[in-house]
């Protein structure tokens, strides 16, 4: 077997930042994560089952090395006790199970203490993706990927000749979980680092950030805020409680807040002057990006905050032309950043998998995401979804 994951740093930075926060704030939380494929694969994912299980066996044999721990400790927002926890951490195979059904669907479920199962997510998605795309013509896919990557660099070269705007165009790689392969992601990130240094500012992949001398990028994801739906605070207060805990944990670092766990309007109702001043900016991950950006700018204006001091990060299904278009709309009014995932690391002429592994329960009760894009809503418990909509005054899609 050729291992897909060779280092426990080969994951998104925000897995570590959320992991540390939950270890410090709610270490006893029990959690369940569920794998979902949202589109129809060309080859049934059930055929990957044996290989997935073999890769999970290997993943559960890995430990953080001394050099990896030293790199994490060098990040100013990573605390020494978290590094000590990681020093003895090892994935437990009993906490994750992969099965298949007669319809050809692959099922993966991780359940146990959240501080022991949260990090499975990105590794599972990387494993499934790479195993799946090994079934296609590798040489042909790589050749097409390189052609498309060269075209992206040409677009950026042409954009560089345009007159500057008030705030520059900056983007980063967010493509760990949907990548064609680990080797291809490394090639893409190195090419962007060398070919577009004016615009390319980092990667969410901690291993590549270390190896290629880039800034690791990331703050929080949906699971962090969703967890607060089940840790003993009133449901109406879960966003404020999550944001307050983040502020206390990082005290000015990692200041981009995610807005779409119960939709932008419900988020802004909780994102008052206190949080708007403490957080550097907001991240978009669903719904119309222009409408979302206008709402964010109007919110800062109502609070009498100079929008030029804040940042909007866009990360929903982006490619470079779409990101440049959004930049053109807002670049004279606010700072921006663009996290581009699948279109950077899996643009090979093949149909990418639309796979996720989301937090679906915590402490024995359901949790949910009410996305601004209805297809991204995550929760199978209709009773809880109805209650969540009622609490936040959200109409059913």
Image (cartoon, rainbow, N blue to C red):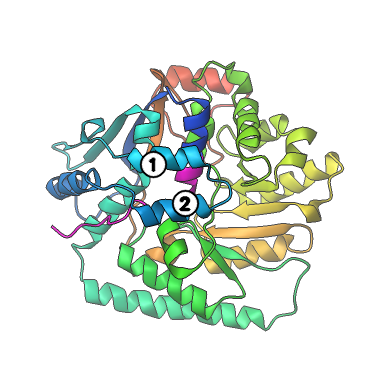
Tell me: residue 133, above or below residue 278: below
Query: Residue at 42% of width from left, 40% of height from top?
Result: 84
Residue numbers of the magenta segment = 1-17
Give the side of residue 70 with respect to residue 271, left or right: left
The dot on residue 77 is: none
Above or below, 178 relative to 259: below
Q: 263 or 338: which is nearer to us? A: 338
Pick the front one: 394 or 247: 247
Q: Earlier in the sequence, mark 2 or mark 1?
A: 2
Taking the magenta stretch, the answer to whether it contains residue 7 is: yes
Residue at figure coordinates x 49%, y 20% from the top left: 230
Figure check: 29 above or below 90? above
Which residue is under mark 1?
Answer: 86
- Mark 1: secondary structure: helix
Assign the magenta stretch its main secondary structure: loop
**Residue 119 shows up from this direction:** no
Q: Label 1 near label 2: C-beta < 8 Å? A: yes
Residue corresponding to mark 2: 72
* Residue 339 on the magenta span: no
**SS under mark 2:** helix
The image quadrant that residue 90 belongs to is top left
What percent of the width, then of the height, locates residue 14? 49, 46
Task: Provide residue 279's location: percent of width, then percent of height.
Answer: 70, 43
């Amino acid at each position: 077997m050729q291992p897909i994951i060779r280092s426990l740093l080969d994951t998104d930075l925000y897995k570590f930042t959320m992991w540390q926060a939950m270890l410090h704030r709610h270490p006893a939380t029990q959690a369940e994560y569920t794998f979902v494929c949202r589109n129809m694969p060309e080859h049934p994912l059930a055929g990957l089952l044996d290989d997935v299980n073999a890769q999970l066996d290997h993943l559960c044999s890995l430990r953080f090395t001394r050099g990896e721990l030293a790199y994490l400790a060098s990040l100013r927002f990573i605390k020494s006790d978290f590094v000590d926890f990681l020093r003895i951490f090892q994935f437990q195979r009993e906490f994750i199970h992969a099965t298949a059904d007669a319809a050809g669907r692959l099922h993966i479920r991780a359940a146990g203490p959240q501080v022991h199962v949260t990090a499975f997510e990105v590794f599972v998605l990387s494993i499934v993706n790479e195993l799946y795309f090994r079934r296609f013509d590798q040489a042909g896919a790589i050749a097409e990927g390189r052609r498309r990557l060269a075209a992206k660099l040409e677009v950026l070269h042409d954009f560089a000749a345009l007159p500057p705007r008030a705030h520059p165009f900056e983007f980063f790689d967010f493509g760990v979980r949907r990548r064609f392969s680990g080797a291809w992601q490394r090639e893409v990130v190195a090419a962007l680092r060398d070919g577009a240094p004016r615009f390319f500012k980092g990667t969410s992949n901690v291993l590549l950030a270390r190896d290629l001398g880039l800034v690791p990028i990331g703050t929080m994801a949906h699971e962090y805020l969703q967890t607060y739906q089940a840790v003993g605070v009133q449901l109406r207060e879960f966003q404020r409680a999550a944001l307050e805990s983040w502020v206390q944990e990082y005290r000015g670092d990692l200041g981009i807040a995610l807005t779409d766990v119960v939709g932008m309007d419900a988020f802004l109702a909780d994102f008052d002057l206190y949080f708007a001043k403490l957080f550097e900016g907001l991240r978009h991950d669903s719904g119309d990006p222009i409408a979302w950006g206008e709402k964010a700018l109007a919110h800062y204006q109502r609070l009498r905050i100079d929008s030029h001091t804040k940042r909007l990060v866009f990360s929903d299904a982006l490619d470079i032309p779409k990101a440049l278009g959004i930049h053109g709309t807002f670049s004279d009014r606010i700072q921006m950043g663009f996290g581009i995932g699948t279109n950077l690391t899996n643009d090979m002429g093949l149909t990418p998998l639309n796979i996720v592994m989301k937090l679906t329960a915590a402490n024995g009760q359901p949790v949910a995401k009410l996305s601004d894009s209805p297809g991204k809503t995550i929760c199978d418990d209709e009773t809880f979804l109805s209650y969540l909509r009622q609490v936040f005054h959200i109409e059913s899609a």
